[in-house]
Image: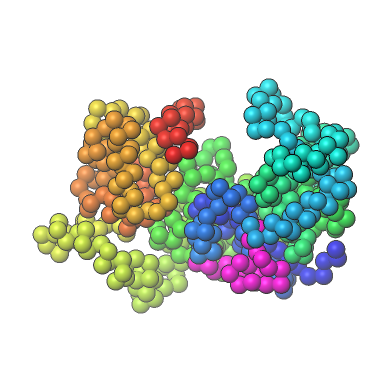
Amino acid sequence: MTHHAVRVRVAPSPTGDPHVGTAYQALFNHVFARGRGGRFVLRIEDTDRTRSTAASEAAILEALRWLGIGWDEGPDVGGPHAPYRQSERTAIYREHTERLIAAGHAYPCFCTQERLLALRAEGHGGYDRRCRDLDREEAARRLAAGEPAVIRLAVPREGICVMHDLLRGEIHKDWEAVDDQVLLKSDGHPTYHLANVVDDHLMEISHVIRGEEWINSLPKHLFLYTVFGWEPPVFCHLPLLRNNDAKRTKLSKRKNPTSILFYRDAGYLPEALVNFLGMMGWTMPGGEEKFTLDAMAGAFRLEDVSLGGPVFDVEKLRWLNGRYIREDHTPERLYRRLEAWALNQERLLRLIPLVQPRLETLGDWARLTGPFFADRVAVDLEALALKGRKPGELAEILQIALWRLDALGRFTAECIEELFQQLADRLDLKLRDLTAPFYVALSGGKVWTPLYNSMEILGRDLTRARLRDAVEALGGISGKRMKQLEKTYAGLFPPEE
């Protein structure tokens, strides 16, 4: 395929909150396309049928739109290469898989999950290719009989894969170290590896700009391009966002709020967050730290992206956001921003019924509603306690509650109340004792408006961030203890429930 025009894509997976890492990659694709008169495609990678949700997809689109990052083709706007959801393209992937099987580049694998787990337990780096040399007629017969199977890619067994990355140059990897990747799952849905290569080719993507975690998968992707007889796109793997800690670990929600919607609800301006993400691994030619999306699109060159791990420093973001508030707003314009953010009739009318029974003067309003308009609250550590439990134990109970809240489909007062009753029951605690530290963690003090309704109005993202802050205030949970706690959690709340 000869690339005449720049065509780029971002392909988020709708399996959770819209992540700032998705926004960072979308931004760099967006400005690269805009600066070169190209097209930017939004594609939904919903191949994980158990975890993908329509609500998550809607939140991703909403978050990117809020940031001002638009797209030319996508599931909501259509385009010449529709459909743009992978779940709607399964016939395309099956057809391409059949081509690979017919050419001997892929094969059905009948190994059970139990056998694969046993291989892993024995220390095998990957699949041992047991089904690769099955007689083809026998394999076809077993498939025809309805025996469950996945389809695997038959990667070369020897030699070296030579890859090229725009930022890193030539990268070499021994084929021996590359697994026979599953391309099609037993339910007929593709894995990311097959779907992204087929879609990138059919959608005429010229440059694949994505996170560096995909470099290890690049040999499989390049091999697919080769066996299909397609020209691969230019690959550019962006450095991963890092936490602002001593080890510069990969950005994680344990250390930072990572949901774009947290930053919206906490009162950050979209133009400041986009500007901040633009500084991740890239610098304006003149060194300016405050710049618009248009200015970035005009100056951006992929080759100028730095490979040093960009640090997502929330304090730097706060500083930049403060500049936008002070420098770009008259009092009238700032009033309109405050009104649109949270000081609007719809939100205030939700708060009044919670606050009114506790008001003695109108002046009490500020004290009672303050936590609803704050990004973070100062926690009273003396008050942050659970009757009969040590601080470390409370931290673990807060973490278990976080996991339950993450798994909650609808973030409503009714669902939250049910969750707390279940928690109290399984942790063998009185409900009143259990909820006491949550008032402190979420509002900063012991006295607040009714907990479940308050959590619903506060929203999932701010609730989560405050509970994580409380866990850290109590001393945090070590990596080793977190693994043990995950087992305890699985015992209290089995996955099949």
Q: Quadrant of residue 209?
A: bottom right
Q: Position of residue 280 (x, y in %)?
A: 60, 54
Q: Quadrant of residue 355?
A: bottom left
Residue in the image at 29% along x and 30% along y: 428
Q: Position of residue 118 (x, y in %)?
A: 66, 25
Would you say residue 137 is visible in this rendering? yes
Q: How is the image coloured?
A: rainbow
| Furthest residue toward top | 122
Where does the magenta region start and end? 64-86
Would you say 279 lies left or right of 103 here? left
Would you say 109 lies left or right of 363 here? right
Question: Is residue 84 within the magenta segment?
Answer: yes
Quadrant in the picture for the N terminus: bottom right
Residue in the image at 69% along x and 56% along y: 90
Q: Position of residue 378 (x, y in %)?
A: 31, 46
Would you say residue 462 is visible in this rendering? no
Question: Is residue 446 within the magenta segment?
Answer: no
Residue in the image at 21% along x and 44% along y: 446
Q: Is residue 438 above or below residue 133?
A: below
Q: Could you say which is closer to the camera, residue 390 or residue 497?
A: 497
Q: Could you say which is closer to the camera, residue 300 or residue 186?
A: 186
Quadrant in the picture for the C terminus: top left
| Furthest residue toward front | 145
Would you say 420 lies left or right of 80 here? left
Q: Is residue 495 above or below residue 340?
A: above
Residue in the image at 68% along x and 28% along y: 115
